[in-house]
Image: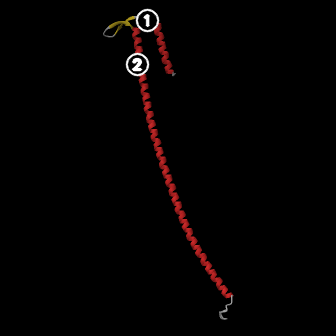
Amino acid sequence: MRIRSLLLILIITLIAAFTVLNWNVFLANTTLSFGVTSLDAPLGLIMLALLVFMVAYCLVYVLYLQSNVLIDTRRSAKELQTQRELADKAEASRLTELRGFVEAGLKQGAEQNKAAQQALIARLDALETALRGSVEQSGNSLSAYIGELEDRLTPDKDKPAALR
């Protein structure tokens, strides 16, 4: 228990003990003045009844405050849960958007890679064609040179001796 609760229980116990010890005095009649009229009644009993009434009133008030706090706490917990769900949905939406953005970037990168690869293949094909043409031309030139050398080295019977 809290110190306040223990203190309250101690005070109520002391009042109860005081009342039991002085019960005869509490029941003794006294002339009470209410301003307009006077009345013979036990002052101690009236004061004890007022004390019990005030304690009961304070207890009801504390219970009322406690119930209001409990209701507010539950309402706040529901609102917090709602806000948490909204935040989770927003986060999921952001993650979905990020996933779409990353996938679009990867797709674009793959398309650029494919385009660059096709351009490279086309350029390699063009270079290969040019190289084959160059090799063929070099081969033809070489064949022509070799043929000319053969013609110079081998004597022809059909040619006049002056051309040999």
- Of residues 131 and 44, the one nearer the viewer is 131
- Residue ID at (60%, 78%): 137
Q: In the figure, is residue 98 to the left or right of 57?
A: right
| Amino acid type, residue under disc 1 in the picture | Val
Helix, strand or loop at label 2? It is helix
Work out how far the residue at label 2 is from the one at label 1, CA to CA, in angstroms.
26 Å
| Amino acid type, residue under disc 2 in the picture | Tyr
Q: Position of residue 131 (x, y in %)?
A: 59, 73
Badge 1 crowding class, 10 Å Cα cut-off, few under 14, some 14 to 19, many 20 or more, is few
* As drawn, 44 above or below 55: above
- Of residues 105 and 11, the one nearer the viewer is 105
Helix, strand or loop at label 1? It is helix
Name of the residue lying farthest toward the front: 157
Q: Quadrant of residue 69?
A: top left
Earlier residue among tags 2 and 1: 1
- Residue ID at (57%, 71%): 127
Disc tally is 2
Q: Position of residue 41 (x, y in %)?
A: 37, 6
Badge 2 crowding class, 10 Å Cα cut-off, few under 14, some 14 to 19, many 20 or more, is few
- Residue ID at (36%, 8%): 32
Q: Mark 1 sits on what residue? A: 25
- Residue ID at (53%, 65%): 119
Q: Position of residue 30 (x, y in %)?
A: 38, 5
Q: Mark 2 sits on what residue? A: 57
* As drawn, 164 above or below 75: below
- Of residues 24 and 71, the one nearer the viewer is 71
* As drawn, 97 above or below 146: above
Q: Indicate the quadrant containing the C terminus: top left, top right, bottom left or bottom right.
A: bottom right
- Of residues 60 and 84, the one nearer the viewer is 84
